[in-house]
Amino acid sequence: MTEPRPDLDLRAALQRFGVVVLVFAGLWCVPYAHPALEDWRYLGDIDASPLVRAVRLEPPPDPAATMPGGLGAGTAPGGEELSDDELAALDPGLGSGDASPGSDAHGPESVAVAPSPDAGALAEPVVQPDAGAVAADAHAVAPSTAEVPKTSTTPTAETPGDSGLPRALVFDPGLAPPAAAIEHPERIAPFFAALVALAKGERARVRVRHYGDSHLANDGISHVLRVLLQRRFGDGGHGFVIARSGSRWFKHKGVRIGSSDGWKSRAFIGGGFADGHYGFGGEASAGGPGQSAYVATAAKGQGTTATRVALWWRAGKGARLQVEVDGVRGESIDAQGEESDRFATWEGLPDAGHKIRVRVARGKVRLYGWVVERDRGLVWDSLGVVGARARRWLSADAAHIAAQAARRDAQLLVLNYGANSRNDKISGAKYAKTYAEVLARLRPDKGEPCLVVGPGDHGKKQKGKVVSDPRTVQMVGWQRTIAEQLGCAFIDARAMMGGDGAMGRWVKQGLGWADYAHLTPRGQAQLGRDLYAALMHGLAGYLAGGAAGGR
Amino acid sequence: MLFNSLLFLIFLVVAVFGSWALLRLRAMRLGFLLVASWLFYMSWDPRFIGLILLSTVVDFVAARAIEDTPDDQPRRRKAWLWLSLASNLGLLGYFKYTNFFLQSFAGAARGLGLDATIPIFDITLPVGISFYTFQTMSYTIDVWRRQIPAERSLLRFALYVCFFPQLVAGPIVRASDFLPQLHRPVRITADDVGHGLFRIARGLVKKVVIADHLAVNLVDRCFTSPEVYSSAELMVALYAYTMQIYCDFSGYSDVAIGSARLLGYKLPENFDRPYIATTVAGFWRRWHITLSGWLRYYVFFPLGGSRGSVWRAHRNTFITLILIGLWHGASWTFVVYGALHGIAISINRTLTRAGKTPTDEFAQPWWQIVWKVALTFHFVVLCRILFRAHSFELAGDYAAALLHNGWGLARVGTATWWVLGGAFAVHWMPRRWLDGIGERFVQLPAVAQGAALAGLAAAVASVAETDVVPFIYFQF
């Protein structure tokens, strides 16, 4: 079908459009003529993958990867999550102890230990009337030891490396240094000693408490650390997870949590609970009759089984919780006496998938969080709260924090703050003073070794280029000094990312989000892997009797 | 493939040259544009092209059957109309509202003390479904009303449904506006090129320089953790979000209108400086004009409009505004958002009936204009909390923090102040000033236009917060 030639200025239009396109394209090619104009080379940014996908009829990448706030660059490269197997493959090949894909994902590689019903029983004061039933709603302070009862666990199959050490402790002699090493690794030597004991089957569990801000709140970095360390030292379970968060950015991997809509979540950073009781994780959710919450083991990947689940909560006067264990309604928990913090534990569960749901039947209840653990292995508690600053812990009740911390012994405390505080108008001296006070609260008995992780690089635009935010650089310096003063080891995460201007490069590589502050899932995996490498390098140094992991 | 990506610019250049090369071969040109549009849509997710094809075929067949059925068989005509409406609303309902209805049902059951466990389905919302289903419904309704003839060419109708410039985020084009253009010979002038390019550039600046900057540097942070920001910062973030969403959506419309003009077609305007409105009703005559127009034609007027009793008019307004809210998202926050606007319009109408408001909203003393604009603007700004928060809990947290968190403004950066202030200054400047800039651009020689656009694009790219950030309205 043809139509009469339309009365158009097609020639003029074509000429104009052609010239515009040619001039436009020509000018955009100019920066490729001279290296001095390198910063203006934008043509390399063309991503033709949408058209390629359209032609190949391929579905788009997972849209779930979004920025905090939900308006994120969901199509940005690097937005995809990594599977646990892919994460395990990130183990930087530190030695022959690396996990192989076919190995038991749960058991420590060094010792394959038969699950024991009473392993770790000393860790919590519980009784076990029936598997699956409520074991206790105990108030007593737990003894803080996770040593293996002599009669409880017997290694059934040691798989030592060539050196005679368990394979988890074997590292390549020519181990390459990590992107940034732990500074003063000798300060966390007790943690390394605990890892060695765990690998040798001399203790049942090693716990780490990792506190942080939004960089930790979606469990991205900590999940990588958990997966890699548990593949090496054994899966001790997901650890502590707050029951519910008011932030949509909050997310935990390797465990499932859920709740009804009527809870009011409040974190220590913003106040809201006059008594200052925000629980072990720093965020609690208050609710009344009809509200429910659950925790379940993961459907796949890391964290699919557990032998012990606990609920940390606060009961109002006369409060009652209805409990459902693996779909079966169990006994109710009746809180006697005045309002107080409580701990319900389901111990001795079969090493399988579990789901525990509680529903408020009466009274007021505040949920602090769930503990999901197995009998043996490494546990990495990820305690991130969006928008957190270390000093905000001072607004929580000190005795409450101490009581909560006392129930959960740890062999290492990791403090991962500073990204938000860099914006505060505060002097270095005052920051150091409050930081010391916070550490004292989180570590009331001063027993656990501590590791300060400085903030990662944050960028800002300056004359069209992304440069490091000088306040972040200053914050790294402050935290290094603080670690020195408090006797903590230190890791410079900013240096780990590449130092000056790192965030700009990470954004271009799809490892950082466009706010030049937060990391994409792949960026978190990268940083988690680097932190793991630094820890293992420190451990290798410890085993060698030197300071290979330190400077 | 986002409008603010280099890939789209290359795609557009190829589409424009290809379309012009086939200018005298009408069927070939339409076929070329149809394939380009399908390819554009499939670049989002090729699985959902089937939905568009289904909607196209059903509405094409239904409209022809409606037209061919004599008026003395009203039931038969209505049955075809219902087939079209059911298929479109069914698609929209399933993909957009399934989980909303299930969750609402479960919530109601829990409220009655029943232990309702409702499964949540993992349903991906196809891009643009809210736009093209509304377009095709308007077509069959208009044919049913005998206001337009049914399209006899499947090719033309398919292109009307999925014309790529407006496919994924509007404007919602009524068939009576667009199908006649597909029947006429296309006429393109050098001025069309200039105007089209200027419109695209204007849209990209709105999106990349203003909307993305405000989102990344203030709005997203405040809505993620409102508790850590001061009241003053949260208020500035609300102003910023109000400007962000305008620049984001109207920026998309500018690119769509400019791109269509390069291809020889005219799309309806979607925005008319909404924040200078002196009433909430006036705001909806200036904001997302094609959606509010659609609901006015197909919901408000059929319900009786403003005729009849006062309460009937209020009811019709209320229903229409709730539907506008619900169109934006499957959440009760959007329902309440629409209801608040409906209440405001009803109150305004009551006052108007007292005989005070003139026909021309600007034919009144300047001080009245100022306070009415300020009042309307702040009503819109505060309602944006519900629009952005997506949950009552977050909206409540935001509102509480807005009232109680003090007055510091330390975390609003200098650049953000400049971007926000500049955006509002341009928004409220006389229209002729902005039009004058466009006319001057059109009059420039082609080489100067190319150089100006290259310079602008380089500047935009250098200040861009990221390579690509999706447009907000894609989620609707």
Image (tube, grey):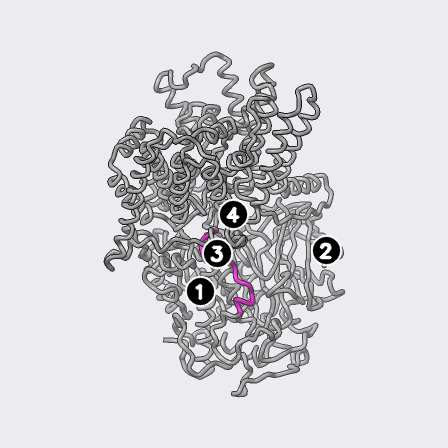
- What is the distance, in whole Å, between disc 1 and disc 2 at their CAs? 38 Å
Marking on residue A527: 1
Whether residue B244 is visible, yes or no, is no
User: Residue B133 appears at what percent x and percent y?
Assistant: 57, 35
- What is the distance, in whole Å, between disc 4 and disc 3 at their CAs? 20 Å
Q: Label 4 amino acid?
A: Met
Q: Earlier in the sequence, mark 1 or mark 3?
A: 3
| Residue tagged 4 | B42
| Residue tagged 2 | A324
Q: Nearer the viewer, residue B267 or B89?
A: B267
Q: Earlier in the sequence, mark 1 or mark 2?
A: 2
Quarter of the view holding residue B140: top right
Q: Relative to residue B371, is residue A444 depicted above or below?
A: below
Q: Is residue B235 left or right of residue B93?
A: left
Q: Relative to residue B316, is residue B194 depicted above or below?
A: below
- What is the distance, in whole Å, between disc 4 and disc 2 at their CAs? 46 Å
- Residue at 51%, 44% in the rendered image: B38
Say if mark 4 contacts mark 1, CB within 8 Å.
Answer: no
Which stretch did the figure color magenta? A75-88
Crowd band around label 1 with a 10 angstrom C-alpha radius: few (<14), some (14–19), many (20+): many
Q: Chain of mark 3?
A: A
Residues marked 4 and 3, same chain: no
| Residue tagged 3 | A79
Viewer-nearest of discs 4 and 1: 4
Crowd band around label 4 with a 10 angstrom C-alpha radius: few (<14), some (14–19), many (20+): many
Residues marked 4 and 2, same chain: no
Say if mark 1 contacts mark 2, CB within 8 Å.
Answer: no
